[in-house]
Image (cartoon, helix red, strand yellow):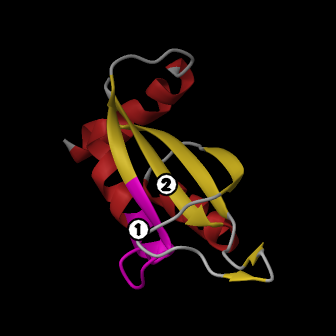
Amino acid sequence: MHFKLIISLVEDHKTDAVLDAARQAGATGATVISNARGEGLEKPRTFLGLSLETQRDVLLFLVEEHLSRSILEKVARVGEFDQKPGTGIAFQLDVEDAVGVSHQIRSLTEVVEEKL
């Protein structure tokens, strides 16, 4: 079984909704890294030297490769990444090898076989 790593940077108030959507699309879990900061095309606004930008969370999903595209699209839709700039991004990377996922492989085998 081959895996992809989906990395998503999400506004912190959307984290739970994105996690739920990814799970509904087939993700079996996630790692959440809180309080990340990002900068886009425009510099963040400040008020008296204090940043007015929203906090971001980094979500890491290790997912089976046949499920990865639908999970990625669901994350983008729920996170509203394409609706307005600065709301977040998501991308996926190939994973060469992974350990500690044997329990996921057993539960995903049936799901993936149905999709193929």
On the picture, is 57 further left or further right than 7?
right
Judge whether residue 48 is colored magenta. no
Name the amino acid type tagged 1: Ala
How many C-alpha atoms fall within 10 Å of the one at disc 1: few (<14), some, or many (≥20)?
Answer: many
On the picture, is 38 further left or further right than 3?
right
Judge whether residue 87 is colored magenta. yes
Q: Position of residue 102 (x, y in %)?
A: 51, 18
The residue at 45%/78% (across/down) is 80
Q: Nearer the viewer, residue 60 or 19?
A: 60
Extent of the magenta region = 74-90
Residue at image mark 2: 8
How many C-alpha atoms fall within 10 Å of the one at disc 2: few (<14), some, or many (≥20)?
Answer: many
Q: Quadrant of residue 38?
A: bottom right
Residue at image mark 1: 76
The residue at 27%/36% (across/down) is 113
Q: Secondary structure at mark 2?
A: strand
Q: Nearer the viewer, residue 3 or 103?
A: 3
Name the amino acid type tagged 2: Ser
